Image: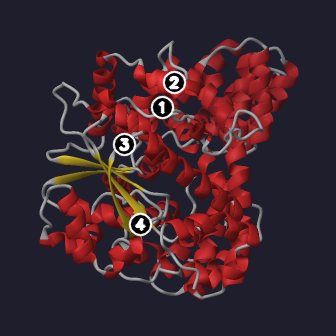
Amino acid sequence: MVQIQLAQALDYLNRGQPRQAAALMRQLLELTPDSVQGLQVLALAMAQQGEAGTARQLLDRATRLQPQSSELWINLGNACLECRDHAGADLAFQRARALGSQTVACWLGQGLACLALHRFVEANDWLARAFATEPDADDVRLAYAQSLSELERFDALVQCLDGVNEAGLNAEQQRVLAWLWAQAGREQQALAFYRRLLQQAPGDHESRIRLALLLERLNRIPEAATVIDPIEPEAAASDAGMFALASARVSRRLGDAGAAIARLMPVLSRELPAAMRAQLQFELAKCHDMQGAVDDAMAALAHAHDAAGAAFLERLPDTRPPAPLGWLQQRMRHPAPVSWQAQVEDAAPVDPVFLVGFPRSGTTLLERMLDAHPQLDVLDERPALEVAIEQLRNDAHWRDSDLDHSLAALRPAQIVQARQCYWSEVRRHVQPQHRLVDKYPLTMTRLPYVARLFPQSDWLLLLRHPCDCVLSCHMQAFGMNGGALAFASLESTARTYAAVMAWWEAQRQRVPVRVHVLRYEDLVHDVPARLEALMGFLSLSMAPEQLASHRASATRTRRINTPSYAQVIQPVNANAIDRWKRYRAHFSDATLATLAPWVERYGYRWD
């Protein structure tokens, strides 16, 4: 009789009739209250009706009656996830694994629990295991994609999302996918998803908030305001800061920093994830800066960098962050052989133009001007060269500590292979029809590699007043990566600036290359003359549309892949020149002493 009732209840569940299944199981449990199977099936029926709390209580009782069942612990873990008891879910899945469970359901649940508990590397490990075993399961693929997004592994994220079967997703999964597409830089796909979601459910506040963030990132500010305006702050009170971030950004972009601050301050008094706290504090700093409140801006930045450091540590497999810019130890000790300057014989396109400079030197402004030229194509902040370098460094005979020998020992076939690797990576992002401009500011710290792989390349080096560079880097949220830790204070940023520029100047003496040096301030003060000289260096004539590149940037459908995305849609102006002077009181004597040689070397002034 018991088995017949169980079978009938399971049949009800399979037919989508959980109420009938629950009624039958309650009858069974009245007669046999310790039936573990009855408790389990009743729990499944309650879960199907949205009663996750009741399901959890039933499964908790079942695990006490039969603690050696890994299946029960997995079901309990899933019920805990539904109840947002992530610590309880973590313990349940750990118990299932201790009992020998080696199933996708267990790895998926464990990974989701770790994600919620901000153990991101561990989450990625479990979810990668589940994904490798069952790549066609969309719930597994989406969870794995979330872990990749948290670790900012965006290239792998795109590849993962490309395999999602969108037709089979429910509304919640569509929301997750839309946000992941936005994080991965596939803005048009994300926009299409959000439009559909809001058409089906106009009251979907989460989708509204995230769509507004995406529109702001695309510089579509009036649209963003229209999307977010219908949301009452009270309706988004439990969204962990996302509504405050979106509404503050939109308000600031519309010129109302006061309204933005009013949105931010109440939320910052709550407990928040470190990554969200960092974003909110960086936004608060921008608002204070807009109002001229220098001290308040610097205080917000201190909190922002503290939170960003904590968020970064959550994403490390251990507690020791790597040395920022540690790759600067790779350097030439002797002049490069003349033979390096010979043109490489292969079928690859003409060697690129490398647009570089210390971060926040104005490279994005110049990039927009170059991208407007009909005979140039721009690769915007994609580490294509790093992919080729990693291929070289995987060779068994490679030694970072002896860059001279390692580069000199490369065989012609290895160079051609590395170049092909570079161009293959480039084509993942842009299909160049003309000469490529590779804009990745810190490629300047890869000078010897470029000289060996692309001997006919040209370099454009953009300089800016060192103090303005340092201040601007300190004020930006560069993402949760180790390099950003170098900008945690004005003093550490100044040391980083000095280290990078000293490396560049020393390596230029070892590796002769064609470099056109341009100061940001000179470009801003006389765009036509400076741009004409630069284009002459590239053996091209200046095109009229280059002088109105901000208009093309404003209508761009893809995001501008830099923190200065909001500035480059404005006409060229001198607003950012000597901005550091307002903050001079916050530059310590040690910071100024570190920058002094570079201020003088590059012809800048203190007054």
Which residue is depicted at the point 68% across and 71% down?
592
Q: Residue at x 36, y 36 (%)?
A: 451
Disc 2 and disc 3 in contact, CB within 8 angstroms: no
What secondary structure is marked by label 4? loop
Q: Nearer the viewer, residue 551 or 132?
A: 551
Q: Cα distance, mark 4 to mark 1? A: 39 Å
Res 169 quadrant in image: top left
| Residue assigned mark 4 | 362
| CA gap, disc 1 and disc 2 | 6 Å
Residue 421 in the figure: left or right of residue 395: left
Tell me if label 1 and label 2 are in contact, CB under 8 Å: yes
User: For mark 1, what is the residue?
Assistant: 141
- SS for tag 1? helix
Q: Secondary structure at mark 2?
A: helix
Q: Which label lies toward us, 3 or 4?
A: 3
Label 4 Cα neighbours within 10 Å, binned few <14 / some 14-19 / many ≥20 = many
